[in-house]
Structure formats: C-alpha cells, structure tokens
Amino acid sequence: MQMAKTLLLIRHAKSDWGDLMLSDFERPLNHRGEINAPEMAKRLVKGELFPQQLISSPALRAISTAKYFAKELNINAADIIQEKEIYNTLTDSLLEVVNSLDESSNFTALFGHNPGITGLVNYLSNQEISHLPTCGMALIKFPFDEWKMVSSGTGELVFFDFPKNDNLI
C-alpha cells in the first residue's frame, strides 16, 4: 500500500555577498547561514521528521544547506540529488521537479531559492505567505500516493518555520 506524499520545501540558508567576483551560482553560505542550517535541521529531528530523500539546487548556497541537513538527519551527503531546474525559480519548473520525484520516497525535502520556493508553497497549499526567510521551511502534505498528482491547491500546509521563529515545531 502506498502512502500520502509529504514535501518539505526549504529555502537555502543566508548567503555571503562579500566577494563580488563570484557569480550568483557560486555564492557560499555566510556565518549566520552556517549556524542556521544545522539548527533548522535539528528542529526536524526533534519533531521526528525524517525525509527519505533530499533534492537540491546545485547552487553552492543551496547544496551547502542541504549538506548541513543531511548531516543532522544521518543521510549520506553523496545521496543528495542535485537538480539544476530548482535553480530556475519559476513555479512551473519547480512543480515539474516535484511531479517527477521518485515515487519510492513518500517524504522528500527540496532545497531551493526565492521567489520560487515561497511561490511554490503558496501555489501548492493556497496559502499567502509573503516571504519564506532564508533557511525557512514549509511542510506540505498531499492526499495522493503519486507525486504526479500534486498540483495547485492540493496540499495542506502543516507547518511553516524559520530561524527567528519563536513558535518552534
């Protein structure tokens, strides 16, 4: 028997703008980002939320965030799937990524960028979150057993969390 699908959308942690010679794609995390990423992953562990699969934009700040999460969740960093389409922040592109996720995973975490991540949260759950902060997370549950069924307004926003949030999950 298949299970309903759960998607954790995570915006990359705070990035460093110090080196203007770097391309947007190559920007690393800054000190705060390196602190926030493991902190947010520990909140998942505390809430007993363990994604089966991590998928990330290959941009340095996103994949670095995903690696911090992998460490805290006891997932091998080599198992993080890098998907170049996530770097494209268009909702349609992100939805295509979600619709083509591996069906063997019922709980997937996706690491990406704004405005796309915030847009996808709102699109999938009919919410009106104005801005998912850096290293913010949104957990959405779907009543389907296939990722290809996920579409506009079909998900339920279970929680929305971010580093400066006092209402911890």
Image: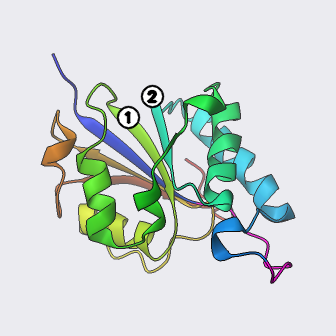
Q: How far apart are marks 2 and 1 (CA)?
A: 6 Å
121 up-or-down from 18: above or below: above
Q: In this view, does 8 lie to the left or right of 111?
A: left
Q: Residues within 10 Å of mark 2 (few under 14, many from 20)?
A: few
Q: Do the residues labelled 2 and 1 touch (CB within 8 Å)?
A: yes
* Residue carrying label 1: 107
Q: Residue 52 carries which label?
A: 2
Give the residue displayed 55% in from the left and 37% down from the top: 80
| Quadrant of the rendering where the N terminus is positioned | top left
Kind of residue at badge 2: Gln
Kind of residue at badge 1: Phe
6 up-or-down from 97: above or below: above
Mark toward the start of the polypeptide (2 vs 1): 2
What's drawn in magenta, residue-wise?
A: 12-21
The image shows residue 116 at horizontal and vertical percentages of: 41, 71
- When asked about the image quadrant of residue 3, the answer is top left
Tell whether position 81 is magenta.
no
